[in-house]
Image (spheres, rainbow, N blue to C red):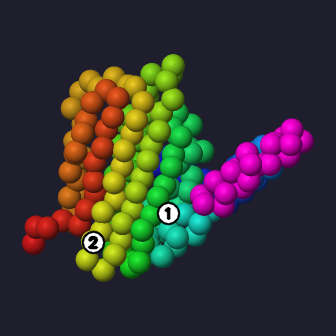
Amino acid sequence: MTEKPFSVNDALRHARHDFLNQMQLIKMNMDLARLDEAREVIASYTEKCKVFYELSKLQLPKTSEWLQTANWRFPGFQVEVGTEITMPYKTEMDVSIRDSLELFTKFLEPKLNPYFEHELRVWIESTENLFRLTVEANGKWELGDDFLMKTQGLTITHECKTTEKWRFHIEESKEG
């Protein structure tokens, strides 16, 4: 579904760039004797790293790759990921989940109002009794034509869909 996947070189280049930005922010805060702010940057960066390590428990490599590169591939969004993963999910659903995220983001990104900040939050719960991936976009965009997301074996439920907030859940289908 993606035109050209990130190469390892692309991913490393972006990761180094992000890391150096964080180091510069820490150094600047230390130079200005703002130690609490420097600690906050370190804590925030550490938490983001923990989330991405947590994704490996999901055992959905394509979905994980999409989540880890979304900030670089879709610069119109500030992407945040949160997890509660105690059990892996069905590997055979990996491409469907990744494609759903890709389809939604590619649909919405060109409609974003350039004068607003846009967030894309993804929360993943994968436990013994539940698999749910919640996507919430916040910002400002135009909603024109209808947009329908469907995928086999998964249920997509829209909770909210306005020109400033769009929230939906991807869950295991309850239908047999």
Q: Residues within 10 Å of mark 2 (few under 14, many from 20)?
A: few
**N-terminal-most mark, 1 or 2:** 1
- Quadrant that contains the C terminus: bottom left
The one of 107 and 83 positioned closer to us in this rendering: 83
Q: Can residue 170 be seen in this snapshot?
A: yes
Q: Is residue 42 magenta?
A: yes
Identified at 22% across, 45% down, the residue is 158
33 on left or right of 119: right
Q: Position of residue 123 (x, y in %)?
A: 40, 57
Left or right of 130: which side holds 36? right
Q: Is residue 60 above or below residue 106?
A: below
Q: Which residue is mark 1?
A: 64
Disc 1 vs disc 2: which is toward the camera?
Answer: 2
Q: Which residues are magenta?
A: 26-48
Q: CA distance from mark 1 to mark 2?
A: 18 Å
Picture coordinates of residue 93 (x, y %)? 33, 68
The disc labelled 1 sits on which kind of residue?
Answer: Ser
Residue 47 percent location from the top left of the image: 60, 60
Disc 1: CA contacts within 10 A as few (<14), some (14-19) or many (>=20): many
Task: Identify the image quadrant of residue 25.
Answer: top right
- Where 128 falls versus 173 (above or below)? below
What secondary structure predominates along the stretch shown in magenta? helix
Residue 130: give its label: 2
Q: Residue at x 48, y 33 (%)?
A: 118
Residue type, label 2: Leu
